[in-house]
Structures are given as structure tokens and as C-alpha cells.
Image: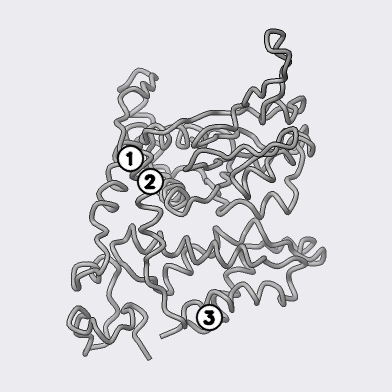
Amino acid sequence: MEDQNTPSSENLDENIPNDSNNTQQTPEESSEDFKNRIDLKPLQDSVDQIKQEIAKFIVGQNEMIELLIISILTNGHSLIEGVPGVAKTVTAKLLAKTMDIDFSRIQFTPDLMPSDILGTSIFNVKTNEFEYKKGPIFSNIVLIDEINRAPAKTQAALFEVMAERQITMDGKRYDMSLPFLVFATQNPIEQEGTYRLPEAQLDRFLFKIEVDYPSPEDEVQILMENHKRLDVMDFDTISTVLSSKAIKKYQALIKQIIVEDNLLNYIASIVTNTRNNANLYLGASPRASIAILNASKANAAIKGRDFVTPDDIKRCSKAVLKHRLVLTPEREMEAFTVDKVVDQILETIEIPR
């Protein structure tokens, strides 16, 4: 059986490093020891440039930034959850600024209506016809701030556009310009004046990214940077790294990343276990399996590998699964968490070798 860090191929043995000592290599070491069949250098350089641009204003939060970049590469939406003031909204805006694409922001409020998002038909007195005026959802990257503050009727307006990249208005279909991505933020603590997202909408998000407080060292660095720039954030200093054409090219490149059959079985085993787990009332859907697969490909690519390893799958599984799983009432009363369940599942299932 193949080693977990090398893809199986009879025609590429000369490109596979000698592993006679059976020592496990890091992804960075592996990327230097063999020649990729797919040229990932431009993609890696672009990701590094994006991180450098965001680092002009954001200290730390590397996990959130990398997962958002993976979201873009896999054409998936992301839900960013964290307490106020941890740079959720600013990071999403900065990320959009590094790309030469359209960006819009929608502040969700309890009085927001579906027409405020999707647009509405207006009667034109000159032509005696109704004209459709597009709403702010018609953009490439849409930042929805505090998505759980809008009522269910407004949240439901996102179902079609997030799943199918289109909306239907007055019986006519309107396709979104690609790439089309939704980044949504929410506060996990405050419950007053909020409306819980339905499971159908949560399942449309590729990732749920939980943003924690910065470390004490990062907090000091934040204060120093803020003091230097006199509490001014000039987003015009952010350079554009990617065009719409480049994003589409990299998204197509990600699909070519190699995945062995035993790793597909590994992903299926993880997701199937969530459906049979005694701690869970609701398991993950097939959409979760596909999300883990695509996210693992993107994670491998930004690490410089043209093949997926079990570590890629494990790294992405938690962010893909945590918002899709529902604990049983008994486990909730015991203060059990979905993260613990996912960790147990990953520890239980045998890793392919």
C-alpha cells in the first residue's frame, strides 16, 4: 500500500523521493523533494502575496485568513463566527481588496427584507413596463455582517443564490457573475435580537471559521501597529493580487489535484460516522463529503503538493463539519461539544497508509 505522502502512479516513480528510512516528511519538505505534475508555484506565490497584504493591518489570525483563501480557491462560502472586535469583517474586506473583483457589504438587521438583498421590480412610467433593479447580492464577494440578525424570511432569500449561484425573480432567472462567494459573520454570544440560522442554510457554507482572541504577544503587536498608523486604516494601500480570470484559473487548477481512492474512502468513513454516531442527532450530508474533498485539495495546493494526504483531510474536516452536526439533547446538557465529537471520529477511524 502506498505511503500517505506519495500519490500512486506507475509512470512517475522517478519523481517520488526515496523513503527507505520510512521517515515522515513535512508537506514543505515533500514539495521540495519531488517535481509536481501540476505547476503550483504561481498559486503559492499569489497566496503568499495576499497574506502579506492582509498582514499590513491584521496581526495573527492566520487560521482564519488561510481558510478564507481556501474558500475562494474552492468557490465555497464561509461563515465567520467570533466575538466583536476580533477583525472578522475587516479581514473579509481586506481579502476582497486584494482581488480585482466586485465587492458589496450587506448589514443584516431585524427589519431587512428579501427585496433589500435581491432587488425588486420597479414600474417605468416611460416604457410602461416593470424593470428589475438588482440588489447588492449581485457582486463577486458579498460580505454579510451579522447574518443571524435578519429574520427567517430574509435569511431564506439566500438559499437559492448560495446553492445555485442564481436568483429567480418574477419567474425569470438571473445568473450571478463568477466567482460568487458569500462571507458571513455572526456573534456566538449575543442571543437577543438574533435568529438562528436554519440547518439548510448552514449546510450551504463550506466552512464555519471560529475566530478566537489574539495571543498576548499579538495583542501587543496590534497596539504597536495601531499606534504607528495613528489609528487610521487606509485600505488604498492594499495592492491587488488576483484578477477574476486568475481566480477562475486557480479554481480549475484545484480540481486537478490528485486524490487516491483510499483517501476517498477515508472521507466517506468520516462523514458516514457522523450519521451513526450516538452523540449526534444530525449527521453530515453528502455536500459535506464533497466540501472536505475540495477543501483538502486546496489545502494541499497552497502547501505546494499536487496530491492530498490524510493530514489535509483532517485539517479541513473540523471546519467543514462543525456547523453541520447537531448534538443529541443529552450531550448538550452534559456540555459536550461538536468539536469533541469530530476529534473522536478522527481518532477512531484508521488513517490510510
CB atoms of marks 3 and 2 within 8 Å = no
Q: Earlier in the sequence, mark 3 or mark 2?
A: 2
| Residue 219 on image: x %, y % | 41, 37
At 73% from the left and 71% from the top, the residue drawn is 279
> Which quadrant is home to the C terminus?
bottom left
Q: Is residue 262 above or below residue 285?
A: below
CB atoms of marks 2 and 1 within 8 Å = yes
Q: Earlier in the sequence, mark 3 or mark 1?
A: 1
Q: Which residue is mark 2?
A: 247
Q: Amino acid at mark 2?
A: Ile
Q: CA distance from mark 3 to mark 1?
A: 35 Å
Q: Which residue is mark 1?
A: 242
Q: Which residue is mark 3?
A: 265
Residue 353 lies left or right of residue 176; in this view the side is left
**Nearer-the-camera pick, 143 or 38:** 38
Q: Mark 1 Cα within 10 Å, few/some/many (few <14, many 20+)? A: many
In the picture, the disc for residue 95 is: none
